[in-house]
Image (tube, rainbow, N blue to C red):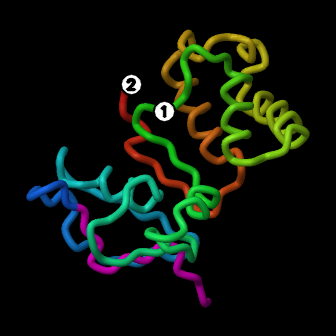
Amino acid sequence: MNRNIVISTDKLTKRFGDFVATNEITFDVYEGEIFGFLGANGAGKTTAMRMLCGLSIPSSGKASIAGFDVYKETEKIKANIGYMSQKFSLYEDLTVQENIRFFGGIYGLSDQKIKSKSNELIQQLGLEKERGKLVGSLPLGWKQKLAFSVAIFHEPKIVFLDEPTGRR
């Protein structure tokens, strides 16, 4: 079986002044694999993920995500990945429906696609009665399900989960 490399790094490094947050990480992740970073707080896991997601430019090294260069093609990376942070990145002062619509728009889905996929998602999650409720009023477990669902709403090639079970 011949699988494609979807994430490739070579000596990827991030410095903040004299502080080295991520030091020369090198690895490949193949299509269909689950890959994780393990380490203590401050080990550079989130910094590494932010570089891989196109949210932070590396100081040195090389990396490609879904075939796109982390230095030159960050917008293409963002369009092809899903990202769920430990803080969920949901807007607590928006309703369930409004959050789904907002993230669908960020990912470039058409209004028609957002509407049809929103209804399907809300039904799958069992949130029909909560669709008009503010996300801030939902229990933690529902917020986690919703945050993951909006991260994959646009059917990305790669999904990054940054401590998805962490408490908000």
Q: Nearer the viewer, residue 132 or 24?
A: 24
In the displayed structure, does residue 92 sit left or right of residue 42? right
Report the quarter where the C terminus lies: top left
The x, y position of residue 108, in whole percent, is 74, 48
Nearer-the-camera pick, 109 or 28: 109
- Give the mark, 2 or 1, whose residue is nearer the N terminus: 1
Name the residue at 72% across, 21% down.
Answer: 127
Which residue: 17% across, 47% down? 42
Provide residue 32's location: percent of width, then percent of height: 57, 70
> Picture quarter containing residue 80?
bottom right
Q: Disc 1 on helix, strand or loop? A: loop
Please give the range of residues in magenta.
Answer: 1-14
Mark 1 packing: few (<14 Cα in 10 Å), some, or many (20+)?
Answer: many
Quick one: 140 or 85, which is closer to the camera?
Answer: 85
Q: Nearer the viewer, residue 77 or 150?
A: 77
Name the residue that disc number 1 marks.
Answer: 88
Q: Residue at x 71, y 30 (%)?
A: 125
Task: Tell me which amino acid carries mark 1.
Answer: Phe
Q: Are marks 2 and 1 in contact (CB under 8 Å)?
A: yes
Q: Which residue is mark 2?
A: 168
How far apart, in angstroms, are the residues tagged by discs 2 and 1?
8 Å
Magenta segment includes 164: no
Q: Is residue 147 left or right of residue 19?
A: right
159 with respect to 163 (left or right)? right
Q: Is residue 28 above or below residue 116?
A: below
